[in-house]
């Protein structure tokens, strides 16, 4: 049985990006270009994915370490055919197979259509095929030339094409299908006799055609999806296409998105029907937003779960947080990694949490920092309360029970425990455990000096 193998070419520098970051590591709606492509390719269920790396190879390898791919290093980078030569040993070890070759900068390639082409190629006797597209402005692309029978005859690069050949609008997308090991005898015949002095992979097609005509092409139906990302402008165009696609799908599923042109939602986000997303919001990563939730304007949610009926008010930042049902978060609230709330929790303006577990019905409405803390149910945290969780070396935990009332401007110096039903007076610094049902207060006694203001005025004369 022939194996299904994919070779991704990701060795180039991407000079037109004018960036120190390798081209394939620029992010496309939240993930590197190469990651989005690999995740699409995985849907084809290949037995092997090989990625050819080169420029900043170690950085690109690191970006791929969570995927089941093999990498080979192309050094120096002498063209697309040279990239195939670089991976030849690994490919020969796989035995007979149908090889898909795709550039690392085409993350939006329509994978269903590509899968259909893959199947057609596998069932054919062709040694090689490519995907072609029609462009109104084909400048810069290799022209696809066919014979009188409509079969692919050769591909001519822009710099090597004659004026007549340049009028052809059918171009090479840079996506190829090849039979292994049949292709290798033709690979050995490729030379660098061209303007760039490189080994061109498209030269294989004329070599095969001249011998037995066992080459063909497939016509891509959505040209822009096959185009590589080679500049910052093309990256922004691809990102906008993907953003609109994600939002369009959510709208069709019953999510209300107001002023969708202003909203950023990444593909991995899941939002249920009946949720409302307001203008100028950003929702990222593996976030899940349940039905009946509303995200108000200028809020950002990252890798978080927002349960049914919860409102995220304006200018809030929710990071790696699990928010319960019917909660009210914000405005101007920040919840950091490890925050977990129960149901009916209120976190108000300028409240920040980190590794905070907050029970049902508890609230901190104003100006508080709650870090490394466990809070029971129906507890009130007064304005200006701080858990002092860092002693200069270690992060320490505060535990607060159920039905606790914490007065304003309280500092809880961890590690410390506050029992159920306890009261803490405003302005108190807690350094010792507070027993259940107790009142803790550490203020100094107030002293009023009568007539002091008048005496001060006299002294200042």
Image (cartoon, rainbow, N blue to C red):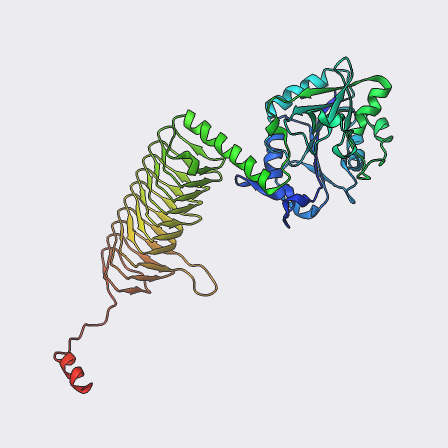
Give the residue at x 39% y 44%.
Answer: 299
| Res 149 quadrant in image | top right
Q: Is residue 446 left or right of residue 140?
A: left
Give the x, y percent position of residue 346. Answer: 29, 46
Number of marks in the rendered image: 0
Quadrant hosting residue 434: bottom left
Q: Can the viewer see residue 339?
A: yes
Q: Nearer the viewer, residue 209 or 60?
A: 209
Query: Is 221 in front, or is 304?
Result: 221
Residue at the front extreme, as displayed: 163
Image height of 88 relative to 129, above or below: below
Residue 383 placement (x, y as % from top left): 27, 57
In the rendered view of the protein, which quadrant contains the C terminus?
bottom left
Q: Indicate the position of residue 107 as horizontal and vertical percent values.
A: 60, 33
Indicate whether 145 appears above or below 291.
Answer: above
Quick check: 221 left or right of 361? right
Q: Quadrant of residue 277?
A: top left
Residue farthest along the top direction in this orientation: 149
In percent of the image, x 86 and y 19: which residue is there?
A: 211
Q: Is residue 65 visible?
A: no
Query: What percent of the width, then of the height, locates residue 36?
Result: 59, 35
Using residue 417 as the reference point, say whether residue 129 is left or right of it: right
Whether residue 345 is situated above or below residue 226 in the rendered picture: below
Q: Quadrant of the N terminus?
A: top right
């Amino acid at each position: 049985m022939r194996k299904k193998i994919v070779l991704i070419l990701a060795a180039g520098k991407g000079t037109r990006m004018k960036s120190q970051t390798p081209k394939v590591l620029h992010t496309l709606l939240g993930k590197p270009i190469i990651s989005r492509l690999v995740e699409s390719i995985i849907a084809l269920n290949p037995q092997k994915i090989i990625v050819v790396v080169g420029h900043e190879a170690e950085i690109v390898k690191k970006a791929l370490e969570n995927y089941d791919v093999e990498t080979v290093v192309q050094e120096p980078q002498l063209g697309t055919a040279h990239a195939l030569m670089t991976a030849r040993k690994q490919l020969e070890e796989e035995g007979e197979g149908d090889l898909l070759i795709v550039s690392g900068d085409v993350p939006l390639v329509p994978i269903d259509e590509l899968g259909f082409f893959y199947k057609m190629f596998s069932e054919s006797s062709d040694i090689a095929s490519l995907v072609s597209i029609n462009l109104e402005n084909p400048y810069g692309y290799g022209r696809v030339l066919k014979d009188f029978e409509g079969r692919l005859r050769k591909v001519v690069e822009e710099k090597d094409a004659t004026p007549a050949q340049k009028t052809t609008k059918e171009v090479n997308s840079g996506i190829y299908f090849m039979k292994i090991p049949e292709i290798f005898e033709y690979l050995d015949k490729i030379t660098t006799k061209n303007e760039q002095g490189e080994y061109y992979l498209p030269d294989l097609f004329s070599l095969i055609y001249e011998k037995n005509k066992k080459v063909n092409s497939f016509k891509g139906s959505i040209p822009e999806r096959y185009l590589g990302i080679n500049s910052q402008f093309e990256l922004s165009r691809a990102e906008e296409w993907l953003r609109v696609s994600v939002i369009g799908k959510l709208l069709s599923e019953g999510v209300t998105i107001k002023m969708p042109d202003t909203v950023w939602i990444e593909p991995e986000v899941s939002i249920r029907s009946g949720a409302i997303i307001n203008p100028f919001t950003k929702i990222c990563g593996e976030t899940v937003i349940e039905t009946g939730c509303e995200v108000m304007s200028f809020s950002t949610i990252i890798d978080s779960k927002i349960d049914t009926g919860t409102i995220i008010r304006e200018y809030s930042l929710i990071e790696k947080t699990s928010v319960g049902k019917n909660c009210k978060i914000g405005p101007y609230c920040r919840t950091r990694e490890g925050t977990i709330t129960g149901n009916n929790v209120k976190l108000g303006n300028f409240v920040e949490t980190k590794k905070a577990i907050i029970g049902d019905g508890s609230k901190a409405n104003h100006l508080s920092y709650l870090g490394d803390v466990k809070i029971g149910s129906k507890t009130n945290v007064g304005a200006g309360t701080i858990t002092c969780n860092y002693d200069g070396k270690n992060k320490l935990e505060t535990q607060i029970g159920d039905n606790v009332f914490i007065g304003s401007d309280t500092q809880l110096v961890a590690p410390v425990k506050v029992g159920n039903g306890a009261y803490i007076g405003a302005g108190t610094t807690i350094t010792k455990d507070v027993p259940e049902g107790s009142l803790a207060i550490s203020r100094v006694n107030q002293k009023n000096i009568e007539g002091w203001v008048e005496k001060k005025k006299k002294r200042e004369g």
